[in-house]
């Protein structure tokens, strides 16, 4: 009988690096990580340390709740193949753009677009573009008001220039630039910027994002040559993942690193809050994706449900699927926060155990109160007027292996 691999980092140094990276409070930076401020996003330093501790170049890394794609970006840069899944088409759009490796020709065209896009914004010119189903279905809700219509018009005109690039990969990148700028301008702001400020920031984000994609390409090209790793983004539920055709042609994931929705914590993964915390599905319009789902869909169940029963049932189904595609040498690392950890942590661990996953602790943390790796996320914000320590700002890193 083959001995079971013990999925601990091989050295005390690797464990210490992992713990330090988890507790690092530096702002998110580098590569393509700032293409969008996805709610509850991973720390790239922690993801990189985890990838290096539990996998090797050429291994497969899986993130079944990929969100903004941080895991996939870091896996690419570290020479690992990766697969990410998410039920949100917005998450899929962002992750796809962030992990696309653009050619010199494409970067040149995007650079020319970046120098011209701000000049194309003219509030006196009538917009000719039609939003079709997006306006009719309410995706531009709260963007026709007195305080927001100018920004909506600037977004419309910016998107027109993105479409004019006439290449899907380039259009997607340009849309992502507009998405990032519109998020800065609208989401959770008490005072909206002027059009001149929008122009300046649009150009600034475009230039920064082009620099970021160059950095990612350089990282991927360094040392991997013709064996350049790839990232795959799938729009689907993690439940039932074992039946995904793509995974049949890939090796067993050596590492699963992910951050599922937090139980009982209200997070708007699919909406912005504009004009006094009015919810708007505008990001889907900008990304040219369809939504149509409510908060509970993206958080695996209403936070008001008795005992969060729908959440924990969906979690159990997802973890069972994850466990079924793991092998004896796989490590599952999850970052989770709770609205009430006093009872939710035990329920979470019970769901993992029922799914066939066994928790293990890092020896480097043996002197911690419960032997687990806890981290505080500084300045975590769920609402426009909520900044600092919230119910989602204390996270725990859980380590599991297949039983």
Image (tube, rainbow, N blue to C red):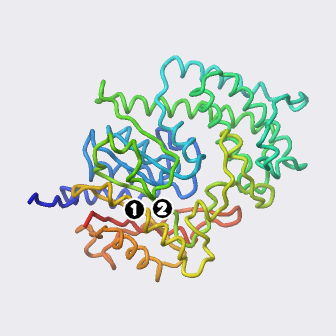
Q: Residue at x 36, y 66 (%)?
A: 398
Image quadrant holding the C terminus, namely bottom left
Badge 2 local density, few (<14 within 10 Å), some, or many (20+)?
Answer: many
Residue 308: image quadrant is bottom right
Instruction: Identify the residue under disc 2.
Output: 260
Q: Residue at x 47, y 53 (%)?
A: 26
Q: Mark 1 and mark 2 in contact (Cβ < 8 Å)?
A: yes
Q: Which one is nearer the viewer's eye here, 389 or 222?
A: 222
Gap in angstroms between the C-alphas marked 2 and 1: 8 Å
Relative to 252, is 105 above or below?
above
Instruction: Identify the residue under disc 1.
Output: 334
Q: Is residue 217 left or right of residue 249?
A: right
- The disc at residue 205 is none
Q: Which one is nearer the viewer's eye here, 332 or 157?
A: 332
Q: Is residue 241 left or right of residue 364?
A: right
- Tell me residue 47's x, y (percent): 39, 51
What secondary structure is found at the residue carrying circle 2?
Answer: loop
Residue 79: image quadrant is top left
- Tell me residue 168's x, y (percent): 60, 27
Q: Residue at x 37, y 58 (%)?
A: 322
- Check the image and name the residue furthest to the left: 1
Residue 224: image quadrant is top left
Q: Residue at x 32, y 49 (%)?
A: 51
- Tell me residue 383's x, y (percent): 68, 63
- Tell me residue 399's x, y (percent): 32, 65
What secondary structure is found at the residue carrying circle 1?
Answer: strand
Give the mark, 2 or 1, whose residue is nearer the N terminus: 2
Image quadrant holding the N terminus, namely bottom left
């Amino acid at each position: 009988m083959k001995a079971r691999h013990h999925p601990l980092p091989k050295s005390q140094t690797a464990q210490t690096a992992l713990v330090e990276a988890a507790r690092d409070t530096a702002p998110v930076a580098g590569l393509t990580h700032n293409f969008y401020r996805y709610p509850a996003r991973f720390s790239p330093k922690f993801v990189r340390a985890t990838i290096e501790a539990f996998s090797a170049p050429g291994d497969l890394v899986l993130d079944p709740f990929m969100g903004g794609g941080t895991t996939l970006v870091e896996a690419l840069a570290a020479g690992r193949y990766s697969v990410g899944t998410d039920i949100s088409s917005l998450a899929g759009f962002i992750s796809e753009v962030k992990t696309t490796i653009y050619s010199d020709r494409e970067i040149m065209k995007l650079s020319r677009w970046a120098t011209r896009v701000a000049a194309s914004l003219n509030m006196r010119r009538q917009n000719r573009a039609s939003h079709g189903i997006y306006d009719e279905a309410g995706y531009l809700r709260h963007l026709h008001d007195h305080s927001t219509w100018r920004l909506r018009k600037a977004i419309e005109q910016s998107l027109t220039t993105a479409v004019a690039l006439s290449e899907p990969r380039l259009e997607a990148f340009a849309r992502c630039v507009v998405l990032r700028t519109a998020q800065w301008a609208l989401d959770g702001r008490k005072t909206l910027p002027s059009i001149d400020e929008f122009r300046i920031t649009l150009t600034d984000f475009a230039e920064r994002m082009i620099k970021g994609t160059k950095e990612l390409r350089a990282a991927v090209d360094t040392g991997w040559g013709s064996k350049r790793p790839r990232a795959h983004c799938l729009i689907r539920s993690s439940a039932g993942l074992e039946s995904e055709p793509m995974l049949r042609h890939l090796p067993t994931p050596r590492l699963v690193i992910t951050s599922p929705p937090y139980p009982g914590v209200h997070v708007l993964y699919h909406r912005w809050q504009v004009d006094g915390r009015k919810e708007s599905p505008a990001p889907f319009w900008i990304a040219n994706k369809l939504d149509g789902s409510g908060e509970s869909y993206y958080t695996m169940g209403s936070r008001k449900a008795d005992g969060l029963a729908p959440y924990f049932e969906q979690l159990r189904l997802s973890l069972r699927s994850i466990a079924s595609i793991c092998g004896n040498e796989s490590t599952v690392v999850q970052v989770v926060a709770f609205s009430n950890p006093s009872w939710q942590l035990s329920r979470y661990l019970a769901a993992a155990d029922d799914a066939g996953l066994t928790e293990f602790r890092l020896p480097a943390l043996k002197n911690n109160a419960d032997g687990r790796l806890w981290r505080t996320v500084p300045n975590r914000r769920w609402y426009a007027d909520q900044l600092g320590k919230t119910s989602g700002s204390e996270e725990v890193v859980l380590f599991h292996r297949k039983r």
